[in-house]
Image: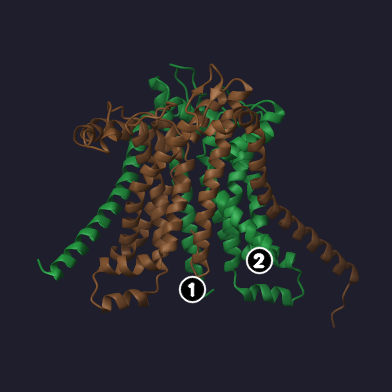
Chain colours: A brown, B green
Amino acid sequence: MAIIDPGHAAKQLIYERVFRSATLAAAILVLLILGGVFVSLLRGAWPALAHFGFSFVTREIWNPVTDEYGALAPIYGTVVTSVIAMLIAVPAGFGIALFLTELCPPLLKRPIGVAVELLAAVPSIIFGIWGLFVLAPVLQRHVQPWLIEHVGHLPVVGPLFKGPPFGIGILTAGVVLAIMVLPFIAATMRDVFDTVPPMLKESGYGLGATTWEVMWNVVVPHSRVGIVGGIMLGLGRALGETMAVTFVIGNAHRISSSILAPGTTISSSIANEFTEAVGDLYTSSLIALGLLLFLITFTVIAAAQAMLRRLERRGFAVA
Amino acid sequence: MTRRTRRKMTNGVFLALSLVATMAGLACLAAILWTLVSNGIAGMSWHLFTQMTPPPGGQGGLLNALYGSAVMTLLGILIGSPIGVLAGTYLAEYGRDSRLSVTIRFINDVLLSAPSIIIGLFVYEIVVVRIGHFSAFAGALSLAVLAIPVTLRTTEDMLNLVPLGMKDSSAALGAYPWRTILSVLYPAARSGIVTGLLLAIARISGETAPLLFTALNNQFWSTDLNAPMANLPVVIFQFALSPYKDWQDLAWAGALIITVTILVLSISARVLLALLEAERGSGR
């Protein structure tokens, strides 16, 4: 017969309350962090936003001497580098996912998957120095002259590939970003493809479809939401990526028609100029850039998570 | 050309392209590692670990930067991981599918992919501006904020993997949830939680952007948490972009050290997870 000690039970209850409150407080702190990020950025950005108003996002000028700042060039650079990155990384990531789910010998599946994931673990500053000292010279010597000679005089797309081959610039930044987001896109797509019921694929094969036809007509339609979610997750990374871009973009606050020219992005402007910024308006303008980046990436990542969550309910774990 | 051959050719072309994409991805990883090893090995010497970062054109090492990185990473994990583990515990054991938990889970996943430079600006605003100067403590704090989402995520996932029977047995013995969590669930999920910590360390030890506005850099030896502190990523950033050969060599050596550390951490985390799965598979 057990004897219940009332004192012991009461103490247990107190411990329980304390522990539960501690875990709850930690969980709520996560919410507070996100709220805090928004509020503190808004406060820091307020002087610049109040001074320039809406023209902050529509003007290209960025002049610390006359204390005039506009975010158009960084916004343009951010969008264009990310678009280039996605144009390269989405097909390549799709290819890797296709290879891993349909073609790869089972023995190699794990090592190659791990290698792709290790590429995601390499810190962004490493991509930066690699991009600057290895990739940029290669692009400058071999790829860009070819683009200028063969694509530069075509109508419509021609102006994008005009001017001298600098090596560093918008295009190089886009290529480095593509390599950086490739593992995220490939890994998410692979996980999404793995959730397609084998029965569906077998039915396709049973009708005499080739591997590619099963992929394109069965697997892709079935996992559309997940594919888009994975792409947007990669896009979120590309938009906010800082150090790698800072190394190779050339840091020029102007909008050139050519993607071979140097440019700037939101994050690389902040990284480059923040510690050297003198004057409240200058600092505040940089924080306003940070606020813009926060709003853009938050929207993209939140949309991506919402899409992947719709899949999760069908039994898919978000990577 | 018959329809049949055309379909077969389409198939062959796309499968070949997927092979090319995979090879290209692996080639990038190999190229980056090769560049790091071939450039970094030249700068490898004992001086790296015994001397301070040099002035322009001088000889020196990376001792202060290595120390600073270790201190700030460690401090970041010490502050961030308990919060992440506790919050993950709340989501897995207390909150579950309440509206609050669903929201927190969502916000956490957003934070997980949020640009780290934003976190740097945030800590700059709430710490550096208030105190009035850059400090190692602010750097550690920004790393802690980055470590929280990683540890939260793995803790929640790992606690969810613990067999329900173990929890029920503990409850049947009259244990309150806190006892069950501390004495049954945490030990059962230990290697999983440790994996999360390793991944978090790997994630924050290479971060550069948030440290630029918080810890900044310091050319000299400093152990003062209330002063700017040297750290490997920012030193690599400054030295690699400098025109001095000595500085660039040090940057490559630092890049090699940081990458090897992070890859070793990531691989150990994976091995740990694989061991865990094997253990589960053997019906324990």
Binning the other alpha carbons within 10 Å of mark 2 as few (below 14), some (14 to 19) or many (20 upward) gives: some
Q: Earlier in the sequence, mark 2 or mark 1?
A: 2
Q: Which mark is residue B96?
A: 2
Secondary structure under the numbered disc 1 in the rendered image? loop
Foreground residue among B31 and B209: B209
> What kind of residue is marked 2?
Arg
Q: Residue at x 30, y 60 (%)?
A: A99
Image-quadrant location for residue A46: top right
Task: List x then y, in percent, for residue A171.
Answer: 34, 36
Kindly identify which residue carries mark 1. B282
Q: Quadrant of the N terminus of chain A?
A: bottom right
Using the image, determine if residue A82 lies above or below residue B246. below
> What kind of residue is marked 1?
Ser
Residue lying farthest right?
A: A6
Task: List x then y, in percent, for residue A315.
Answer: 50, 70
Q: Residue at x 31, y 68 (%)?
A: A217
Have a look at marks 2 and 1 and say if they share a chain.
yes
Can you see residue B151? no
Label 2 resides on the chain identified as B
Residue lying farthest left?
A: B1
Task: List x then y, in percent, for residue A42.
Answer: 64, 37
User: Would residue A83 be found to the left or right of residue B125 on screen?
Assistant: left
